[in-house]
């Protein structure tokens, strides 16, 4: 039972354009949503988060959107830079719990 | 500053061998987590410690997996009688206590069971 799904295993975007990564979830009890970025041979690094009471959070080039009715989360990166090439994981937490439930990841490649 | 460190970074074990994986969390972090990441998948929760207390071990796949954090800092994940399906990257993360606090991950230990 995959509670968090990232249906695109990979995405290729031209440098300077917008990258949009998507994530769907099934459990309406999730109350906190996060994006992590992972480079090869490193652990995931926290990128940005949003709580269930909001629908948008912005931090520099990164914006996360939450659509609770659709149970859908997205990450927008604009403009995309070569250093953004990595695997991106969405992760959620359940109310009262700290453990993260991760999606399968999307490999983002930014082409010069 | 010092982040989460894990050792060894790579471990090759023969099937049936016992292994021990170490995690040094960020100093002062109360919460410590272990995750297992299979190839091409996202990390999956194994177990959670608050100081020395193991509050959640619901993700441990079998009784061959055992974790401890006896003094509330360093943690060890032990896998007994390793099987090929145990091959994965084992990630440790630490954080402050409050829900929603950012979890900081170590680089992981890549375990290969032959």
Image (cartoon, helix red, strand yellow):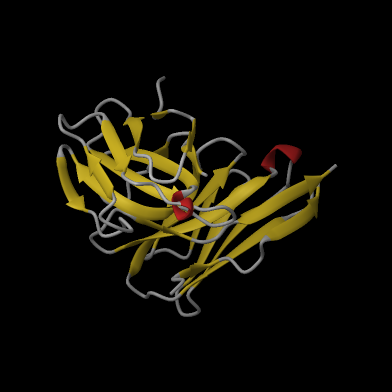
Q: Position of residue A30 (x, y in %)?
A: 36, 67
Total count of labels: 0
Instruction: Answer whether residue B20 is visible to the viewer in this image.
Output: yes
- Residue that protrudes farthest toward the right in the picture: A112
Give the percent coordinates (x, y) of residue B8: 44, 28
In the rendered view, tell whether residue B26 sits above or below residue A37: above
Q: Is residue B97 visible in this depiction of the protein?
A: no
Quadrant of the snapshot with the N terminus of chain B: top left
Front one among A34 and A66: A34
Task: Single out the residue that lies furthest toward the top.
Answer: B1
Seen in the picture, residue B8 relative to A88 is either above or below; the reply is above
| A85 sits left or right of B49 in the view | right
The residue shown at (34%, 31%) is B22
Residue A21 lies in quadrant? bottom right
Q: Is residue B62 left or right of residue B90?
A: left
Q: Is residue A19 left or right of residue B112?
A: right
Q: Position of residue B36 (x, y in %)?
A: 42, 50
Question: Which x, y percent locates residue B30?
Answer: 22, 37
Q: Is residue A33 left or right of residue B70?
A: right
Query: Which residue shows up at 32% across the image and 72% down it?
Result: A29
For residue B4, above or below residue A39 = above
Furthest residue toward bottom: A69
Taking the spot 20% from the left edge, 35% from the top edge, the residue there is B69
Residue appearing at x 42%, y 51% in the figure: B83
Viewer-nearest residue: B113 or B68: B113
Q: Nearer the viewer, residue B58 or B80?
A: B80
């Amino acid at each position: 039972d995959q509670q968090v799904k990232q249906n695109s295993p990979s995405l290729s975007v031209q440098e300077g354009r917008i990258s949009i990564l998507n994530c769907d979830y099934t459990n309406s009890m999730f109350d906190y949503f996060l994006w992590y970025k992972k480079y090869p041979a490193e652990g995931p690094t926290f990128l940005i988060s949003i709580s269930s009471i909001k629908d948008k959070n912005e931090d520099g080039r990164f914006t996360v959107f939450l659509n609770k009715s659709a149970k859908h989360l997205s990450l927008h990166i604009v403009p995309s830079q070569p250093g953004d090439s990595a695997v991106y994981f969405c992760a959620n937490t359940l109310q009262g719990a700290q453990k993260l439930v991760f999606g399968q990841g999307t490999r983002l490649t930014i082409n010069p | 500053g010092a982040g989460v460190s894990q050792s060894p970074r790579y471990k090759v074990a023969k099937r049936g061998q016992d292994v021990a994986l170490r995690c040094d969390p960020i100093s002062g972090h109360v919460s410590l987590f272990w995750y297992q990441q299979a190839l091409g998948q996202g990390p999956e929760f194994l177990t959670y410690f608050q100081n020395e207390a193991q509050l959640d071990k619901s993700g441990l796949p079998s009784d061959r997996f055992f974790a401890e954090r006896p003094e509330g800092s360093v943690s060890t994940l032990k896998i007994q009688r390793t099987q090929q399906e145990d091959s994965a990257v084992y990630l440790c993360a630490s954080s402050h206590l409050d829900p929603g606090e950012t979890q900081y991950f170590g680089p992981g230990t890549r375990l290969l069971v032959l």
